[in-house]
């Protein structure tokens, strides 16, 4: 019994670390959907770009962890703005299916563009700090897990402050609630949308760097599965709702860790998509969402 309890708490620690990364990516999905009702399936590939930006910042520029993650976030934010301006802005009044197909096209462009530029071979992410193991009684946590959790908490707190306390955040909430009314009040819709893409992309890039630090390996297709799982996390929490993305990411990470620890790691992906099926069947609006009737 003690061994089972110990394993449960150990997997809980692992799951919260993994879930923090899912939450960072899911925040981008949910912010962009909240503003322009777009499921940005290229978002997982921004996470991949962020990992590569962090890789080159540490290997080529010789930067330490914090400057590397800041540079990675800044570069990814710029990429997010460029993608929005080139790919999504011309499609803003197009049918939903056309925008969705565009997002999938952007995703493939980023993936195979990176394969062309950096080759498909995985790269070993450099050790940006000395790995240390900490014992909390019978439980074990390494320095990478602690850095991931602390970084995620700080970034989520900063995002919450921006959205709730700043003028820019107020504009984002206004556009999310009613874009036409916000435009009539003098809010620059295009600027708000660009800022939303920049923030979401920066958070995804941070997740990419943290994964590189944790797993020590990156590759051009690394964003596909985490991107899909972060989408599941966003739907689970209530897509368009920022606290929902955080909660959904943590829940998904913990469920995956528990399935890996107590059943088999081969079922962890099945568990994630099983959650998506269940949430769509029984609570389509997500845990924090409210059912809204939509006129056709």
Image (cartoon, rainbow, N blue to C red):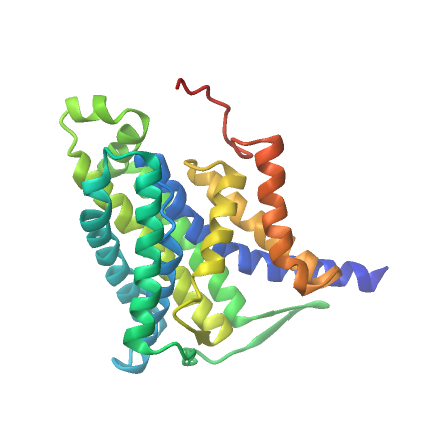
Q: How many marks?
A: 0
Q: Does residue 50 appear anywhere in the picture?
A: no
Q: Position of residue 87 (x, y in %)?
A: 23, 49
Q: Position of residue 76 (x, y in %)?
A: 28, 60
Where is 88 relative to 121, above or below? above
The residue shown at (40%, 56%) is 44
Left or right, residue 19 beside residue 160: right
The residue shown at (27%, 28%) is 174
Q: Position of residue 130 (x, y in %)?
A: 47, 80
The residue shown at (46%, 19%) is 293
The residue shown at (22%, 39%) is 192
Task: Work out whether residue 45 or residue 234 is closer to the camera in this orientation and state it.
Answer: 45
Task: Work out whether residue 84 or residue 248 is closer to the camera in this orientation and state it.
Answer: 84
Left or right, residue 204 beside residue 275: left
Q: Quadrant of residue 91?
A: top left
Q: Position of residue 106 (x, y in %)?
A: 30, 55
């Amino acid at each position: 019994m003690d061994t089972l309890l110990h394993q449960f708490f150990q997997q809980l620690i692992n799951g919260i670390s993994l879930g923090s990364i899912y939450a960072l990516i899911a925040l981008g999905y949910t912010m962009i959907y909240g503003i322009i009702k777009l499921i940005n399936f290229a978002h997982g590939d921004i996470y991949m770009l962020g990992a590569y930006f962090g890789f080159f910042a540490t290997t080529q520029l010789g930067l330490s962890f914090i400057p590397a993650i800041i540079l990675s976030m800044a570069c990814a934010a710029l990429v997010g703005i460029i993608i929005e301006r080139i790919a999504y802005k011309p499609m803003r009044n197009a049918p939903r299916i056309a925008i969705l197909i565009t997002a999938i096209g952007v995703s493939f462009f980023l993936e195979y563009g990176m394969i062309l530029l950096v080759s498909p071979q995985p790269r070993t992410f450099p050790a940006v700090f000395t790995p240390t193991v900490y014992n909390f009684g019978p439980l074990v946590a390494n320095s990478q897990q602690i850095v991931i959790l602390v970084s995620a908490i700080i970034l989520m707190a900063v995002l919450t402050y921006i959205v709730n306390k700043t003028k820019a955040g107020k504009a984002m909430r206004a556009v999310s609630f009613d874009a036409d009314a916000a435009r009539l009040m003098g809010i620059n819709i295009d600027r708000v949308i660009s800022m939303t893409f920049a923030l979401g992309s920066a958070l995804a890039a941070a997740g990419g760097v943290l994964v590189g630090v944790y797993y020590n390996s990156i590759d051009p297709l690394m964003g596909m599965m985490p991107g899909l799982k972060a989408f599941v996390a966003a739907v689970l929490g209530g897509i368009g709702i920022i606290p929902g993305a955080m909660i959904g990411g943590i829940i998904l990470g913990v469920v995956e860790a528990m399935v890996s620890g107590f059943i088999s790691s081969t079922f962890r992906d099945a568990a994630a998509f099983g959650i998506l099926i269940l949430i769509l069947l029984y609570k389509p609006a997500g845990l924090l969402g409210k059912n809204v009737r939509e006129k056709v």
